[in-house]
Amino acid sequence: MKKKLILGGIIGAVLLWLSLRHVEYADVAAQLYGMKYVYAIPALFLLLIMQYLRSFRWGLLIKPVQRIDQLRLFSITSVGFFCIMAVPARIGELVRPYLLARRTPVSMSFALASVIVERLFDVASVLILLIVVSRFMELPPWMIKTGTLFFSAILFLVSGLLLLAFRKEWFTRIVSTVTGHLSEKYASRVARWAHQFVEGLTVIADPVLFMTIAVLSILIWAIGGGAVYFLFFAAGFDLSVIAAVAVMVIVIAGISIPTAPGFVGNWHFFCVMALSLFGVSKTEAMSFAVVHHFLSISVTVILGIIFLPSNLAFIPALGKMTASEKNCERN
């Protein structure tokens, strides 16, 4: 874990340095001063809608096993995303399933499976938007190659998860073979964890629920592109909705790698790089990146702080969780 923290910090620092190279700070300050911040209001509203829809979608993923009230889900989601932002190298991804397992009857293994499925839908949705963007503009070869690689990986993973969802008996036999050399205590625990994990894949086996989650996922990221588009007006950029979606996709790809707290460095570098594809100067792009990053992080931080007190009692030793605690379900 310590190595991941160090790696994320180094990557973030290097990317931030690259973002600020050959940039006059006075020009960035002047650009920030001249922005029309009234357009930040609808952008913030869309970012809030995104957060709510993420929570709502997660509820649909969990619904086949357990109905959970939306306020509780929104609370857990807000704190979870706050931790993802605050803790380097995306270690905070474990917080949401952990809190769900602590605050509801849902097991840790099921919660973890639901988050994995959710992330697969996210990546697939962003890739679909990337394909749409490529129909309207010429993208760099490296982006096409990366998108193709990710699409192939997602297709492979979804195929494997579908196999587990529809052929649970195969998975059960494999688990039985693997746990045959363990003591009865640990064998039963692993078998129970594996069963609950497969149950978390229920959504994939239900065509109606699958399509609902897929459409909702695309909508979530389309709304994210809309937030970027409103910020174009704030910065005075004469760019299209397609450009806004392209910027969002590239930024999302950039912050998916190990990063410093708050995605500092990654966010700015990839935002500047994305805007350069549309002829935006580095100074203007850096100013836009600062505002875009600040607004997005502010929504996450404020919601996280609001709901942190109601969740804090359930994570008294979150920073001291052992590897076994992360992988075992509640008794």
Image (cartoon, rainbow, N blue to C red):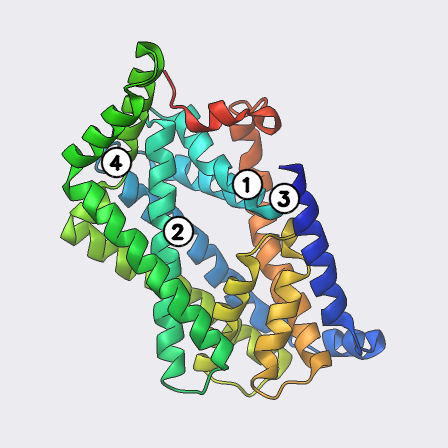
Disc nearer the start of the sequence (4/2): 2
Q: Which mark is residue 4?
A: 3
Identified at 60% across, 71% down, the residue is: 271
- Give the percent coordinates (x, y) of residue 185: 34, 11
Q: CA distance from mark 1 to mark 4?
A: 23 Å
Residue 62 is left or right of residue 25, and the answer is: left
Residue 198 disc label: 4
Residue named by callout 1: 92
Give the number of the mark in front: 4 or 2. Answer: 4
Between the C-alphas of marks 4 and 2, the distance is: 16 Å
- Of the numbered discs in the image, which one, if any, rests on residue 119? 2
* Type of amino acid under label 2: Arg
Q: Tell me the quarter of the picture where residue 289 sits.
A: bottom right
Q: Label 4 neighbourhood size at 10 Å, few (<14), some (14-19), many (20+)?
A: many
Task: Calculate the distance from the C-alpha at mark 3 to the C-alpha at mark 4.
Answer: 29 Å
SS at badge 2: helix
Image marks 2 and 1: residues in contact by CB distance under 8 Å? no
The secondary element bearing badge 4 is classed as helix
Q: Is residue 126 visible?
A: no
The amino acid pointed to by label 4 is Val
Q: Earlier in the sequence, mark 2 or mark 3?
A: 3
State left or right for residue 115 relative to residue 47.
left
Along the viewing direction, whichever of 171 and 258 lies nearer the viewer: 171
Taking the view exactly as shown, the residue that stands out farthest to the top is 184
Q: Amino acid at mark 1?
A: Gly
The residues bearing labels 1 and 3 have C-alpha atoms spaced at a distance of 12 Å
Q: Point out the image quarter for the N terminus.
A: top right
